[in-house]
Image: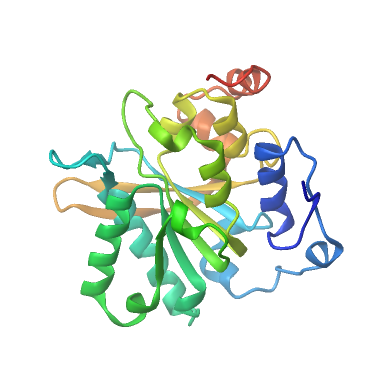
Amino acid sequence: MLRTQYRLPDPCATVVSHFMYDGQVVSAASVLSRNYSNNIILKQFPELGACNMAWYTYGEFGESKEKSEHSKYNLIEVDITIHLVQQLETLNWDPKSICIIAMYERQTAILKQRFSQLGGFFNNLNVLTVDASQGKEFSVVILNWVRSNKGHNLGFLRCKRRMNVSISRQKNYLLLVGHLPTLYGSKLPDFLQLIGLQHNQQIRVKEFSYSTTNCQIEPHNSYNPIAQYLQSHGMQIKEALDHLSRPAAV
């Protein structure tokens, strides 16, 4: 196993290292010397802070599935993704250096359809499933988790190999679009590590509201550290950290 990584920003690499490699992978000196503090992206995405990653979540259950298909999709996450991409467009970010990775093929199909309708900047974005993204790297990755349900069911999101691929394609920034209550509610130690509870509690969360009346999203003006967000939504940090010491469910 390679113990030195050269791609990910160190805060992202720390989460990945503990998630997949028991903390044994470290960042190269060239990675540690990178300076992101003056990057223009922080003016539009201050929630990224010094972590180079942030969570974008929502309160509603957005997961859906066509009766004739097994693959799932989430229109709330599609709308949040479009909002984030539009912000990147205002920064004149190179669209070819941006990749949207979705955990389900149906989600990628809907994203591509919506992007085609929007045209212009959106036509040059990369949209891939997790498996198709393996071996590739991009400046900015926006990850759609898709799963969002009352039963906290994650399906094949439990597969650590796929998850490791999905969170390690970025050279600069990782924007995680997902329903944190579902991930937290799964109580899987791997996911509690992944959402940053143990090794990087400075990861910030920005929440979106969804109007069922006009089917539109609205970003909240503020953002909070992940621990504060979870506590404000009745999710106990101590309980979550206790779960991290337990073996993962098979």
- Horizontal and vertical percent for residue 200? 69, 42
Camera-side residue of 210 and 62: 62
Q: Residue at x 72, y 46 (%)?
A: 14
Q: Residue furthest right?
A: 29
147 to 244, vertically: above or below: below
**Residue at image x 43%, y 70%?**
87
Residue located 38% across and 78% down the image: 124
* The quarter of the displayed image where residue 189 is located: top right
Please tell me which residue lies in front, 222 or 227.
Answer: 227
Q: Residue 199, relative to residue 208: is it above or below?
A: above
Residue 160 % position (x, y): 55, 37
12 on left or right of 155:
right
Q: Is residue 155 left or right of residue 161?
A: left
User: Residue 41 appears at what percent x and percent y?
Assistant: 57, 71
Q: Nearer the viewer, residue 193 or 21?
A: 21
Q: Nearer the viewer, residue 211 or 157?
A: 157
Q: To which quarter of the image does residue 212 belong? A: top left
Q: Residue at the spot x=57%, y=61% of the render?
A: 135
Q: Is residue 107 above or below residue 172?
A: above
